[in-house]
Image (spheres, rainbow, N blue to C red):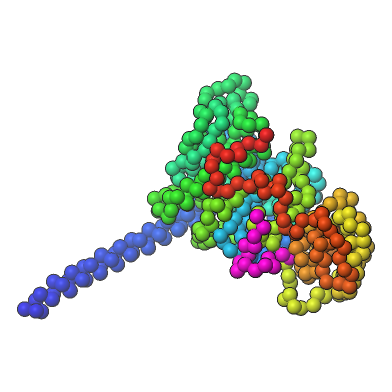
């Protein structure tokens, strides 16, 4: 009798086991289908266009360049207000994820910023000559293609900042619109009524009302119009628009965080995001993108910051303000937050400045390496002092001069083709410096006030420097413009 009773129980166990196995098969098959679908969405750009003389890789944090393309090609044709299929960089920011994976900062680069663009690869395989003092967003349109030239923009950002860009992501109009819909809308604040004529000044009339004054949730086309509108809110400048874009991104990050890891939200968001993006090969699969996204999950809203590259108007263009910009890049290189805290992996008071090519205890060897030294400060004799230290470590100093601009806060090491390793070795004598590639041959050190305040070891004692801020310390002007992802969406919406 016991045996007869046992048979149905064993059968029930077998049936239950079969159901579990079937369920696992279905889940696995579904996950595979989803993975291949997301994988099929992702486009990558040609990494052959990246510079061969790039800054050294960081030892803690990661840098991700995010570019918003305003191309009207394909699905974007019905969303933009302009004409033409050529991709242009409408928005760009450099996201620095600190080594502790608990802090991040996004630095917006105004599209009209005057920068130097290094040689860039065109679609036909040829390379351009470098350009000086031109608009930042022109780098993306070099080659006049619908997909733009993300490699050229990445090269330009690396030249500008001295930071190595680990990944680059291009987001188009259609994808941005779809992502805002996938999260169910984003809260924004509009200080006054905005009309179609504000979005498109060439309309010739005020047009219909786009946004009533006040707080509201928007998605899709409305969200795209909000982040693109320029003339109807505040002072009508691109700087004001950047601040509203930062407020929008803050609110979007907050919305995703609040919804948690709900598949009904995350799967449509992932589908929309991957369809909209063109990425570097290092992010060219769903698995790689998921891994990177998961590395950001522990960042608290208050520790997700947004700011704009220190700037001033230069006619109808934007000029970079020094030494504030140099201090900002130095702080990111050292993995220090905007309030001066060390957020490097594992902490440590020394930060992660420089890019050492050998253990810190190993002697610096400059045998056979030629270096030109420039004094970028108003401290007399600083170049000669550095030249003495370099000579003692085996470097051949080809000359000492004074930089024309002066007032540099951070020491910069520029290297030509084939000199990257020597430049990283040299950087060990200049803690807090940043290293970047240059078109010219050889290596040049432009000394900042950080070297006067804390020079590399040598026989000469440093002179006093009462006016210099500690290396990597941001000015109050820069810090006052910082937004956190948990800030009120109505706060600080427009310059002027």
Q: Percent position (x, y) of residue 177? A: 51, 41
Residue drawn at the location 72% of the way across and 58% of the way down:
472
Q: Write down the quadrant of residue 363 in the picture.
A: bottom right
* Magenta region includes residue 343: yes
Q: Nearer the viewer, residue 380 or 218?
A: 380
Residue drawn at the location 15% of the way across and 72% of the way down:
9
Magenta span dominant secondary structure:
loop
Q: Percent position (x, y) of residue 419? A: 80, 66
Q: Percent position (x, y) of residue 471? A: 75, 59
- Quadrant where the N terminus lies? bottom left
Residue drawn at the location 75% of the way across and 78% of the way down:
361
* Magenta region includes residue 40: no
Highlighted range, magenta: 339-354
Residue 442 in view (yes/no): no
The correct choice, above or below, for 464 with respect to 488 in the image is: below
225 on left or right of 231: left
């Amino acid at each position: 009798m016991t045996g007869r009773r046992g048979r149905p129980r064993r059968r029930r166990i077998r049936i239950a086991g079969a159901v579990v196995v079937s369920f696992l098969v279905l889940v696995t098959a579904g996950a595979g289908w989803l993975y291949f679908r997301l994988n099929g969405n992702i486009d990558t750009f040609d990494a052959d266009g990246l510079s061969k003389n790039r800054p050294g890789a960081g030892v803690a944090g990661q840098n991700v360049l995010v570019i918003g393309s305003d191309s009207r090609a394909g699905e974007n044709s019905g969303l933009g207000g302009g004409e033409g299929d050529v991709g242009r960089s409408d928005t760009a920011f450099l996201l620095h994820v600190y080594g502790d994976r608990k802090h991040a900062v996004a630095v917006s680069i105004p599209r009209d910023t005057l920068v130097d663009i290094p040689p860039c690869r065109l679609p036909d395989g040829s390379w351009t000559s470098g350009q000086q003092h031109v608009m930042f967003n022109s780098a993306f349109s070099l080659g006049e293609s619908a997909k733009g030239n993300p490699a050229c923009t990445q090269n330009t950002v690396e030249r500008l900042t001295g930071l190595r860009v680990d990944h680059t992501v291009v987001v188009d109009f259609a994808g941005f619109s779809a992502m805002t819909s996938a999260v169910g809308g984003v809260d924004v604040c509009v200080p006054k009524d905005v009309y179609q004529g504000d979005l498109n000044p060439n309309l010739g009339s005020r047009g219909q009302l786009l946004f009533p004054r006040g707080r509201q949730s928007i998605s899709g086309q409305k969200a795209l119009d909000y982040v693109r509108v320029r003339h109807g809110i505040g002072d009508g400048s691109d700087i004001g628009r950047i601040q509203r874009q930062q407020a929008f991104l803050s609110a979007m990050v907050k919305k995703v965080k609040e919804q948690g890891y709900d598949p009904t939200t995350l799967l449509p968001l992932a589908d929309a995001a991957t369809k909209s993006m063109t990425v570097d090969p290092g992010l060219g699969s769903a698995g790689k993108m998921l891994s990177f996204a998961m590395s950001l999950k522990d960042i608290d809203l208050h520790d997700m910051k947004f700011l704009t590259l220190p700037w001033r108007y230069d006619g109808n263009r934007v000029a970079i303000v020094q030494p504030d910009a140099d201090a900002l890049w130095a702080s990111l290189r050292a993995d220090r937050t905007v309030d001066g805290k060390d957020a490097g992996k594992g902490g440590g008071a020394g930060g992660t400045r420089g890019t050492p090519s050998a253990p810190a205890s190993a002697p610096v060897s400059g045998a056979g390496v030629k270096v030109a030294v420039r004094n970028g400060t108003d401290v007399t004799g600083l170049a000669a002092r550095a030249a003495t230290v370099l000579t003692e470590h085996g470097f051949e100093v080809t000359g000492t001069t004074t930089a024309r601009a002066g007032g540099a806060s951070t020491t910069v090491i520029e290297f030509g083709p084939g000199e990257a390793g020597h430049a990283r070795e040299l950087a060990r004598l200049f803690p807090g410096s940043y290293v970047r590639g240059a078109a010219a041959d050889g290596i040049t050190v432009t000394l900042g006030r950080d070297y006067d305040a804390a020079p590399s070891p040598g026989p000469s004692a440093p002179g006093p420097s009462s006016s210099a801020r500690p290396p990597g310390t941001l000015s109050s002007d820069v810090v006052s413009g910082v937004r956190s992802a948990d800030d009120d969406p109505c706060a600080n919406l427009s310059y002027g």
